Amino acid sequence: MSARRLASLTEKWFRKHQRPLPWRAAYDPYGVWVSEVMLQQTRMEVVLGYYERFMTRFPDVASLAAASFDEVTAAWSGLGYYRRARMLRDGAVDVMTRFGGVIPAAVDELMTIAGIGRYTAGAIASIAHGQRAPIVDGNVARIVARLFAIEAPLGSPSLVREAWMRAAELVAASKSPRDFNQGLMELGALVCTPRNPSCERCPLRRECAACMDDRVDQLPRPKAKLATRELRIPLYLVTDRTGRVLMRRESGQLMRGMFHLPHGDTTLLTGTPLRVIGGAVLGTFRHTITNRRITFEVFAVARRPRARGDEYAWIDPAALGAIPHPSYVRKALRLAGIGK
């Protein structure tokens, strides 16, 4: 099969079937960068609800670089994987200090910016600047594995290596790297899906080894699944006379800087375990983070404790939008009839 033919078919399909996404209005490098970081490990429909609000709050690299970590993470609250927001802000500072506020076009330069790896560099270079730079995400790896009947499991080093090699060959043969790279990702999202792909709608079906051999449902081979961890975590709802809620600022790497409800070992909070009203929960809810399925139990605390340490703060629930917090905090507050 010809790389030029595959690229041409993909470009033509994209120009006809592309979705009207907000960052496609002008292909501004900053907007493309923000969209690609948001889309990592997050569904498109979720990102669309955040992208325009984030861009209104931080319309350019300068405004993002000038913002505090708290401001950026607060605007990101609910998207999850908060390290992405911190690295995006670090990258904006890097662009301002080393590139005079201009996002470079070359992949090699882009990869020197904090938080930008090979995929994001290729996306910015090709989609915003029209450079012939390959990109490989989950959608592209899946399409390439089916097109060329690659037997390696999804996510394996061998599939990753071959997918990057094939992607480089294909984008080099394209007329419009912007249309081609977006076309591959769009095909993966809308047509060549992980399960029940719509091969009859695919412009590449006559060039696809998996389709011709009736092996589309077998490729790419699945990767080994992480064992699911079931966790049960108590959350303690402490309010003062004005309705403010006691929250603790996380210092660990996973959600550093985020405000949580007190949980786990509450002797750090009061010096003694918290006493719960009536010994009963206000309610429970489930929350999933990667391979962890968490059941949260929300308890009302009988008396207002004296918080120890600077990591605790009294937060007005109406002001939650201005501080960084994980989405489960709002779920817990709703169980207690607090907030929206």
Image (cartoon, rainbow, N blue to C red):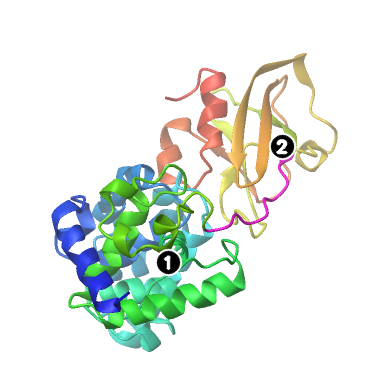
At which x and y percent is residue 66?
35, 68
Report the residue at 50% width, 22% height from top. 338
Report the residue at 56% width, 19% height from top. 336
At which x and y percent is residue 49?
32, 42
Name the kind of residue labelled 2 in the image.
His
Residue that numbered label 1 is attached to:
144
At which x and y percent is residue 3?
30, 77
- Which of disc 1 and disc 2 is earlier in sequence? 1
How many labels sit on residues?
Answer: 2
Of labels 2 and 1, the one closer to you? 1
Label 1 crowd bin: few (<14), some (14–19), many (20+), radius 10 Å: many
221 falls in the magenta region? yes
Residue 29 visible in the shown view = no
317 falls in the magenta region? no
| Residue 196 appears left or right of 63 | right
- Residue lying at the far front in this picture: please name it: 213
At which x and y percent is residue 195?
46, 44
Q: Which span is picked out in magenta?
A: 220-229
Name the kind of residue labelled 1 in the image.
Val
**Element carrying mark 1:** helix
Numbered label attached to residue 263:
2
Occupied quadrant, residue 182:
bottom left
| Residue 132 appears left or right of 85 | left
Label 2 crowd bin: few (<14), some (14–19), many (20+), radius 10 Å: some
- From the viewer's side, name the closer residue of 307 and 34: 34
Which quadrant holds the C terminus? top left
- From the viewer's side, name the closer residue of 253 and 119: 119
